[in-house]
Amino acid sequence: MIARLGLGFCASEMGSIWRTTRALCSPHHSSRIGRLRMSTQELLKVDIINEKQGVGEICMQKSPVNSLDRAMLAGLVDSISRLERDGCRALLITSGVRGIFSAGLNLLDLYDQQKEDLLQYWGMVQEMFLRLYGTSMLTVACITGAAPAAGCLISTSCDYRLMLDQPKTVIGLNESLVGLPVPDWMRMNFCDVVGRRQTDLALQMGLLFPARDALRIGLVDQVADSPEQLREAALQRVAQFLKVPDEGRVPSKRISTEPLLSYLSGRRQKDAELFVTSLSQESVQAVMGKYLEALRNKKA
């Protein structure tokens, strides 16, 4: 099966394309942190699911597609910090929206916005990556639905990735399809996972990979046939990782992540300016405008 082409950004108006169902976060564990509430909408469910081992979970449940708007980005950063302060050694990132892991950045935060607003939003995207990629916790992405664009970024920011093998579950960085080059640090992160040749092909063509293809190129580490099987496999993998003392595992992780963390941290303003310049091109804004209009018409 060849990788698919598709548009990886999402808008809040996507309506009922996908239904929200019960969270994949286990309902049988009590939460020591409880649920985060951003504004009036519940976006994330944050639990410590195994206090003895120190395993936490962030379940994204922002209907309809877990779009990364400002509140969602801030919530992810805050959730990671809370779990770290609580002494967690490992973190599962899951989704409670059927058929979706995260559909990526929120188009409404990118379309027809003032420069300062765009710079601020992109700074929040950078911060989310730095906090997730840079945490000392073992991080495991449980990809139970589509993960295009920034949904893919969340996944590749984690130490281990498991993906549900279902037809509409795809993953990849497909920004080129709306006329945007993938920022260099995102490219570097993706390349660290799959290698240069696969990165060149995938990013130029805006490819989205089904589970088996993602496994073949190393974009994910395991695939599963059901959400239950995926969760069980994720917990088994966490248990194996945590058998390694943090005194050995954490420094080993930092050696791998430090170069990219230092690179982005040292050029955040320049990166933001480059992104906003690319985003503000009339041709790019026109593509986004047409896409938003199509979504509005579909909803109507």
Image: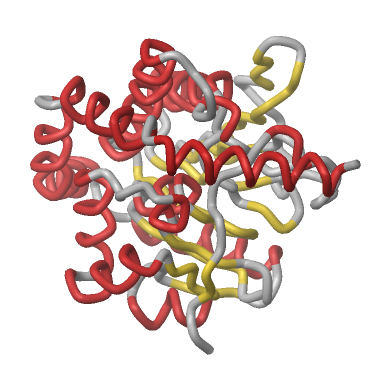
Residue 69: image quadrant is top right
| Horizontal side, residue 23 vs residue 270: left or right | right
Residue 173: image quadrant is bottom left
Viewer-nearest residue: 279 or 54:
279
Residue 200: image quadrant is bottom left
Residue at the (76%, 35%) spot, across then down: 13
How many numbered marks have been drawn onto this rendered protein structure? Answer: 0
| Horizontal side, residue 104 vs residue 219: left or right | right
| Horizontal side, residue 195 vs residue 204: left or right | left
Q: Looking at the image, which residue sits at the far right? A: 300
Q: Is residue 44 above or below residue 217?
A: above
Residue at the (56%, 67%) spot, across then down: 170
Please provide percent x and percent y for residue 126: 32, 29
| Residue 152 visible here | yes
Please provide percent x and percent y for residue 279: 38, 34
Q: Is residue 34 above or below residue 11?
A: above
Q: Quadrant of the C terminus?
A: top right
* Figure colour scheme: secondary structure
Please provide percent x and percent y for residue 228: 70, 64
Q: Is residue 127 above or below residue 253?
A: above
Residue at the (67%, 74%) spot, across then down: 166
Viewer-nearest residue: 256 or 53:
256
Please provide percent x and percent y for residue 185: 21, 44
Residue at the (43%, 43%) spot, across then down: 283
| Residue 59 visible here | no
